[in-house]
Image (spheres, helix red, strand yellow):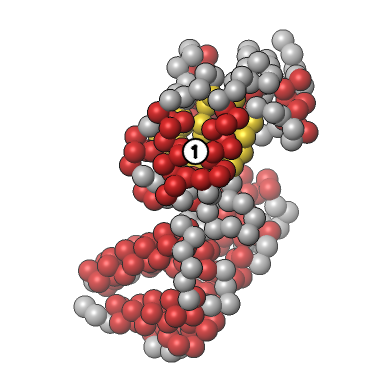
Amino acid sequence: MTEITNTLSLPLPWQESIWSELTQYIYTDRLPHAILLSGPSGIGKGRLAIALAERLLCGSESHDYACGICKSCTLLNAGSHPDLFPISIPEKSKNISIDEIRKLSSVISKTAQQGGRKVAIINPAEALNINASNALLKSLEEPQGKTVLILVAHRPTLLSATIRSRCQIIQLTPPSCELATSWLNSMVTDQTNIDKALEISDGRPLLALDYLRSDSLRDQQYFEEVVSAVRTGDLSFIEAAQQCAKLDIGPALEWFISYLHRSVIKDKRMRSNQNIYLFLDRLNYMYSLIVSGSNVNQLLMWEELLMSWRQTYFSK
């Protein structure tokens, strides 16, 4: 048997059971033509999508993972495999346009250049605009030959119900704290802030790793201090909005949602305040607008959100 070299992507430790399920689909020729990997950001859905794509394109069918040394794997390693089509948000754009999907439809309608499968990865799938979503439906409804479409979605509810219904949905969740901690210990030399990074990332290991390797942990802690100060009345919502407007709006809204979830779990008073859940709905709506590429006045948005946040906390 050909030796496997781990030069390509492998599933993460907490994805082994899902990986086993996927490989069984492959061995028994039951792999769906469209798969939706669903779950919160920062848990490795993109990594799993790439590992699956590489396994599907690998020329050695007898391995659970891409072998890393066949012709297809050599092309994958070089980033030049002609039958792999990754689609993400283009630079200087806020969403995936219909042009991107039209290009994809054109190439997957042709025979695979390497004679095997064609694999497309759309990540994040919720960034598809309305026209792009409608264009993708044709490919989902009329799969071309050995084409496999892998969609990755952090917030699958932002996808149309029709697209979701055409996919085999695989739900991913954060790993246990023990497994996440063990993995992070193997990834960083300074373990000092691992517990804090996992707490503030809601147990999402890749997001925690990003925090540990960058200034994100410091930025999120600062953001939560600002939000807490507004809640207690120690900082005006206008001053807080000016500070929040300096941050990247997408991650900041995710931080706010995460902060609210953790606060509700810890504080019984918040759990009894029904307006908190209405405010959470508003946060999710604002986040969906940002993900969809809508243009908003960030300072005005933060002023409205933080004023509402202050009022919500004291409205019983």
Identify the image quadrant of residue 68.
top right
> Taking 92 as reference, is 297 left or right?
left
> Taking 227 as reference, is 55 left or right?
right
Viewer can see residue 121: no
Viewer can see residue 61: yes
Q: Is residue 240 above or below residue 155?
A: below
Q: For the point 47% across and 21% down, which residue is it? A: 31
**Looking at the image, how many numbered discs can be counted on the residues?**
1
Q: For the point 47% across and 71% down, which residue is it? A: 296
**Residue at disc 1, secondary structure:** strand
Quadrant of the rendering where the C terminus is positioned: bottom left
Q: For the point 72% across and 10% down, which residue is it? A: 1
Residue in front for this viewpoint, 156 or 100? 100
Q: Position of residue 172 (x, y in %)?
A: 45, 40
Q: Position of residue 245 (x, y in %)?
A: 53, 77
Q: Position of residue 146 (x, y in %)?
A: 54, 19
Amino acid type, callout 1: Leu
Instruction: Give the residue number, with chain letter if any, for mark 1.
Output: 151
Q: Position of residue 223 (x, y in %)?
A: 52, 74
Identify the image quadrant of residue 179.
top right
Q: For the point 53% across and 49% down, which residue is it? A: 96
